[in-house]
Amino acid sequence: MSRALRKKEVLERLKALGEGVYTQMQRGIFPAVRMASRSVRNIDYDPHLRQYVLGDQKVLRSARNVRHLRPLAQLLWAGHVARSLVSQGKTSTLRDLFYMAQADEVHFKDQAESDNIVTDLETILGYAREDFHVFPEERSSIFGDLTIEYTVPGYEGRRLNLMSHPDGLVIGPTLTSAEFVHCNAKICIVIEKGAMFTRFVEEKAYERFKALLIQTAGQPPRATRRLIRRLNQELGLPVIIFTDGDPWGMHIATVIISGSANAAHLRELATPDAKWCGVYATDIVNYKLPSDPLTELDIKRLYELKKDPRYEGELWKREIDMFLKIRRKAEQEAFSRYGLTYIVDKYLPDKLKELAL
Amino acid sequence: MTGMAVFEEISPADFFYRNRDIAGFSSPSRAIYSTLRELIENSLDACEAVRVLPEVRITLRELRPSPTGAFFYSVRVVDNGSGVPGDKIPQAFGQVLFGSKFRLKQTRGTFGLGGTMAILYGQITTEMPAHIVSSTGDRYIHDYELMIDIQKNKPNVLRYKVHTNRDGWHGTLVEFTMEGDYTRAMPKVLDYLKQTAIVNPYADITFVDPKGRLYVFERTIRKLPSPPKETLPHPYGVDAETLYRLIAMTNTKSLSAFLMEHFHRVGKSLAGKVLERANLDPNRSPKTLTPSEVSDLANVMRSFEDFLPPDASCLSPLGEEILEAGIRKELNPEFVFVTKRKPSAYSGYPFIVEVGIAYGGGIPRTGDIVLYRFANRIPLLYDETSDVSWKVIHNLMDWRYYKVNPAEDPLAIIIHLCSTKIPYKTVGKEFLSDRPEIEREILNGVRLAARNLMLYLMRKRRFEIGKKRFDLYARYLPKIARFSTLLSGHKKEPDIGPLLAKVSSLGLESPGKMKGREGSHEQSPKEEGSS
Ligand SMILES: Nc1ncnc2c1ncn2[C@@H]1O[C@H](COP(=O)(O)OP(=O)(O)OP(=O)(O)O)[C@@H](O)[C@H]1O
Ligand SMILES: [Mg+2]
């Protein structure tokens, strides 16, 4: 969908939200807003879409229920803020929003509460918060031979090559909304940790593999997931994900590939064709990597993952079982035992071959 | 003569002098408290006897330090009561065990001892005479200065004057000097006055203490409790001692007539049955009974089943209106419930229990229920934990059932027992023994009160929830209106009036509407295991 169209539709849906409440009040009815339920029981994995989706259950936020009054007021406030942001072409962060509320005498207990209202608004509008210009604080970064063109007011038409800064460029609102102009990369490598990302840049991995490098800094923010999806869909770049060798690393990859339960109300965030390329449990064995014993929490997490429909694939099953068998985990940096360049020189080419990329 | 003990006859005045501890004069501070208490109670009795709204003026002045380290005080109490007939004044105030309240009717005083004992104590500690001025409202005011002859138990009049009573004044002024310690007695004295005011809201009491501080306990209700009627003793309460006394004074010629004349609710046929059971000829003269026959008769009378229960008309309970007024005036609580139980009797003595419960407002949170105990309108201040009311509240009540937490809730319980004979456990007249009949009435009264408190608290909680609810709507509906208007691009905000009206019509009644008057006295709570 084109950006302009998107903007128009977001604005229309916001207006419809306000209109519904307004007319109900005008008629002397306690206003209510209906939205899809995000309760665990209404979240299903859609094997077709290869992501989590919400089921048919709806919830009603009704002013008839005194406990819904505050969330309803908060929701409409958030809608009002979203409308101003989108129509004025401004952006805001989740944290900003939490503080802005105080100025309007809408009280949020904590940021978790305001974040949750933003999620409500996403559910009602069917658009991600980035579409109404609200961004998270955590930022990941990107480096590689891709030229983009900004679309934000004041920068429209300006171009930038993403190799222009060796620390990488922050994946913020302006970058997420930019158009891709020219790309010389053939693959996108997503890396969990900043230190490893820097190593990849230093070792010129982007040249050797013709790669765009993205650093997620842990669980990737949605803007980053959206960008990864766009790189995959719009530019046809294969995506590989390189994380620590533990259940948490595996899950970073899974969320990029299949989406998170938290965002089951949203589409266009998942990249189902992305591939996890390590560190595998089998790598720990095969490469004799320095490793640490799994903690109790790690093991508990592995058993949870075993039951998760997103982990149905052959690879996942094999690796989970191997983790449980060897009861050890390894970080990306573990490859340093073979020298600083080993990972780029040997491991990665091996892996690409293995994944047939 | 050798080896035989010498019996020395001592006068009652002498006896009480030697045993002044029992009568409440064991220390200078206790003496102050007991003196004020005895004089105030005499004054209140004197006012109620002629049914005037009491006005009692008390003044305590410090004169000089006493050799024992305490102080000498001048105490003065003036009332607007019955007054004492001129010729009776010396005896009433100068002779121990002379009194007008020996009959079976509810009064505060009983023994003919209290006030006189105070005067006696004053005389012993200061060697000064007492000053009494009194009039019954006739043309004369009698003015005495007297001392008590301790050995002879006789008044010794030092000076007597008669003034013309121009204004028709009636009442009594009692004034004397005594040793005491007001500083230490102060908390108890003030407590006593406050509690006296609770059960005497129809009295106007002022007290000027030695520092010149004025305490005013204002009258808030112009209604006296209905007066007690005199009654004869009930046969169940009889002992050999009483029989002897009655036999000595009776004019009746037959035992049958004796029983009918001197006992409460005894008719001819009942008298016959009793005498038959005691194997006594109904026509015999009572004066001919031998000591063993007297004690047999007393035993039969006490165990005879067919007597009617004693009549309670000789009692003078406060009534719910007066008790509530007293509680409101002195404790200023948020909620009060009072109940007067039906008359009942223990060993031939009629009694009535009145119970009040007061919650919130001026009631402090002390970590426990504040208990106020009264017997015949006298506050009982000492030995609370030995009292039957304490036992009821702490051991017999299951407060959880009433959703009350005695450790946290600001709660006071007021128990008033009226009876022709208060079952004090000791001579100190400070706490009631646990007679099962009295205990049951107190328990039932407290339960009824507790249930009404629970209803009130539930109503209040509901009201508060309703109020909170309304406040939330009043706060958030305008915001919803504003933001939905901004969001939809309308010019004018929707009117939230109709919605707010809907909210307030849903359960927003004030708990104040509820009067402390729910449930009947007959009701005995079935919820709790009966005792
Ligand atoms: N202020 C007063 N007004 C009228 N009569 C009084 C007053 N004070 C005392 N009397 C009379 O003096 C009598 C003796 O009083 P005293 O206090 O010694 O005994 P009591 O009140 O009869 O019994 P108790 O020993 O229980 O106090 C009373 O019975 C009463 O007749
Ligand atoms: Mg007396």
Image: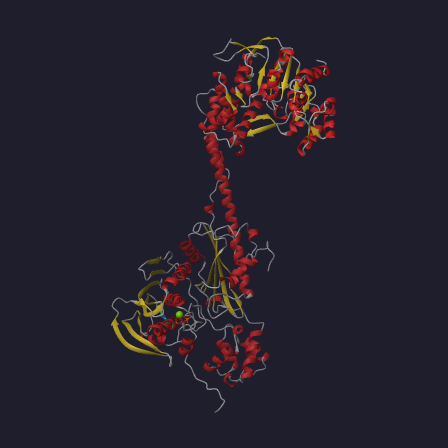
Is there any visible trace of residue B276 in the rendered image?
yes
Q: Which residue is most to the bottom?
A: B1
Q: In this view, does A287 lie to the left or right of B250?
A: right
Q: Which one is in front, B28 or A118?
A: B28
Q: Which colour scheme is used?
A: secondary structure
Q: Which one is in front, A151 or B421?
A: A151
Q: In this view, does B128 lie above or below B397?
A: below
How far across and down, in percent of the image, does residue B388 sit? Answer: 52, 63
Q: Which one is in front, B431 or A213?
A: A213
The image quadrant where one finds ligand 2 is bottom left
Q: In this view, does B193 lie to the left or right of B414?
A: left
How far across and down, in percent of the image, does residue B490 sit? Answer: 46, 20
Q: In which quarter of the image is the C terminus of chain A?
A: top right
Is there any visible trace of residue A52 in the rendered image?
no
Q: In this view, does A284 lie to the left or right of B147?
A: right
Q: In which quarter of the image is the N terminus of chain A?
A: top right
How far across and down, in percent of the image, does residue B519 sit? Answer: 52, 53
How far across and down, in percent of the image, does residue B523 sit? Answer: 55, 56
Q: In this view, does B406 lie above or below B188?
A: above
Residue at image position (49%, 16%) is A89
Q: Which one is in front, A331 or A117?
A: A331
Count numbered badges in the picture.
Answer: 0
